[in-house]
Amino acid sequence: MNLRWLLGNFTDPQYHISRREQFRLSNVAHSKYVPASAFWARTAVIAAPFLAAFALIEPSLAWAGLQRNDVARAAAHAAVVVLFWPWCAWMYRSLYARPVRMAMRDAGYDVCLGCGYELRGLDDTVDRCPECGESRGTVAFEIEDSPVKSGDRQ
Ligand SMILES: [Zn+2]
């Protein structure tokens, strides 16, 4: 199971991309393929419940009579971080996975934009990804939850 996305790595492990190259690809994806409005909208959606959960820690500790208990306070903060981490990572993954694949294409990797499948070595007559059916030549940026879709998805 590939859980590298929990750490912000959205490339498939089969590519053996170094941490430095991964960072560079993420920067290219961020600056070239992710609109700033999409980034900030996603960040707001992520931050709002996270901050609300943190804001509820002190009232919850007071309600439970633990406002003087530093161990309980630390545990509550740790619990919020641990519970929200996968959700935050998944939310950013849904925004960045495709742009990172587009940056990989720019860097010469023959990768499916839809699923990340490696297309290198496939015959040129194969115009769709064998894994997900995405058009091999698709280059248009699509935010996954965008109501406006371009391209010729089936
Ligand atoms: Zn695919």
Image (cartoon, rainbow, N blue to C red):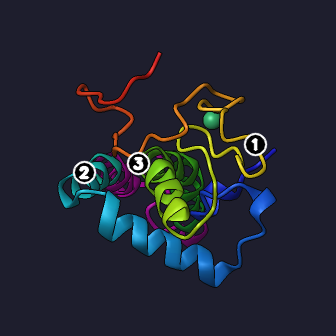
Nearer the camera: disc 2 or disc 1: 1
Which residues fall within the magenta stretch?
48-71
Q: Earlier in the sequence, mark 2 or mark 1?
A: 2
Q: Are the residues at dot 3 and dot 2 in contact (C-beta closer than 8 Å)?
A: yes
Q: Residue at x 45, y 54 (%)?
A: 96
Q: Amino acid at mark 2?
A: Ala
Q: Give above or below for 7 relative to 132.
A: below
For image coordinates 44% across by 22% down, the residue present is 153
Magenta stretch holds residue 62? yes
The amino acid type, in three-letter code, at marker 3 is Leu
Q: Residue at x 58, y 62 (%)?
A: 78
| Residue that extends furthest to the front in the rendered view of this protein | 125
Rendered location of residue 146, percent (x, y): 28, 32
Mark 3 to mark 2 CA distance (whole Å): 8 Å
Question: Which residue is labeled 1 in the image?
Answer: 122
Q: Identify the secondary structure beneath mark 3.
A: helix
Where residue 114 appears, as percent x and y from the top left, is 54, 38
Q: Amino acid at mark 1?
A: Leu
Q: Earlier in the sequence, mark 1 or mark 3?
A: 3
User: As drawn, which residue projects farthest toward the left?
Assistant: 37
Give the residue pinned by disc 2: 38
Identify residue for label 3. 95
For the residue pair 6 and 138, the one nearer the viewer reads as 138
The quarter of the image that holds ligand 1 is top right
